[in-house]
Image (tube, rainbow, N blue to C red):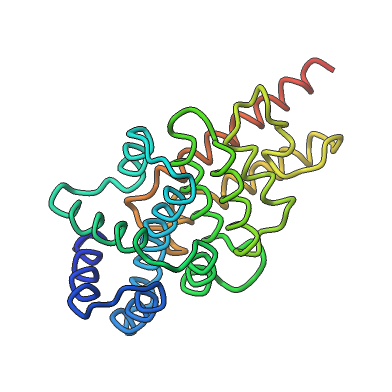
Amino acid sequence: MSIWDRIGEFVARVTSTAATGVADVVEAVRTIFEGDAELRRRVSFSIAMIALSAKMAKADGIVTQDEIRAFQQIFSVPPKETRNVARLYDLAQADVAGFEAYAERMAGLCGSGRPNCAMLEDVIDGLFHIAKADGLLHEREGLYLHRVAQIFKISEEHYQSILARHLDLGEADPYTVLGIERGRPFDEVRKHYRKLVAHNHPDKLIARGLPEEFIAIATTRIAAINAAYEMIERGFRHL
């Protein structure tokens, strides 16, 4: 049974009990999937992505077709489950609770509670992918993402590294993309790069709860890391 079948079951149960707020959604996840920690992590991540995508669209005030396509690209939603995802998306948009309340609840639902939690970084990466789908990261989207990252306890330095991964490398500092100080010896850069690649391998992401359906996030991240490393490597070759 795919993650989308599980999401469909979850949405049906939530809406049938007339739950309308983020607290109800979070409590329902914990109750329904109480006996399966791995499945709960996967569902929690999925719901966090859907709910915070909805809140980002509401904060920005504009939902473009490019953003909708990017959402579908990350989620790879089967046609038969599109309606259930839309119901959860609409539930989050209609909820009177602000996005900060949602971010706090989602951090508690699928985060480790420690700074720079890897799964919450995955959520931020997915939101960036959607936000920049129309070719531009709008000011309101940027403010939204920055604030969500703060609520997620992602440090400013780490957030800048995430942000740099989503900028054109003509604008982004490749050292910032890799999260390493400029001026470090190349051996250190290479060692750090290899560690990043291993840490962000799709198998690693799946092991920590990222559903297989969301591996587009890992692919985009690895591409940005590889491009940054290659740029640094070329620079050393010309010394």
Q: Position of residue 117 (x, y in %)?
A: 59, 63
Residue 83 or residue 217, whichever sits in front: 83
Residue at x-position 44% and y-position 49%? 202
> At 35% across and 78% down in the image, what residue appears?
24
Residue at 31% x, 73% y: name it. 20
Give the answer, above or below, for where 168 lies relative to 146: above
Residue 92 appears at what percent x and percent y?
36, 62
Q: Please, which residue is most extreme toward the left here?
A: 80
Classify residue 66 as left or right of residue 114: left
| Residue 110: % across, % down | 47, 69
Q: Residue at x 71, y 38 (%)?
A: 190
Does residue 218 appear left or right of residue 155 in this picture?
Answer: left
Residue ranking furthest to the top: 238
Quadrant of the rendering where the N terminus is positioned: bottom left
230 or 132: which is nearer to us?
Answer: 132
Q: Is residue 70 left or right of residue 116?
A: left
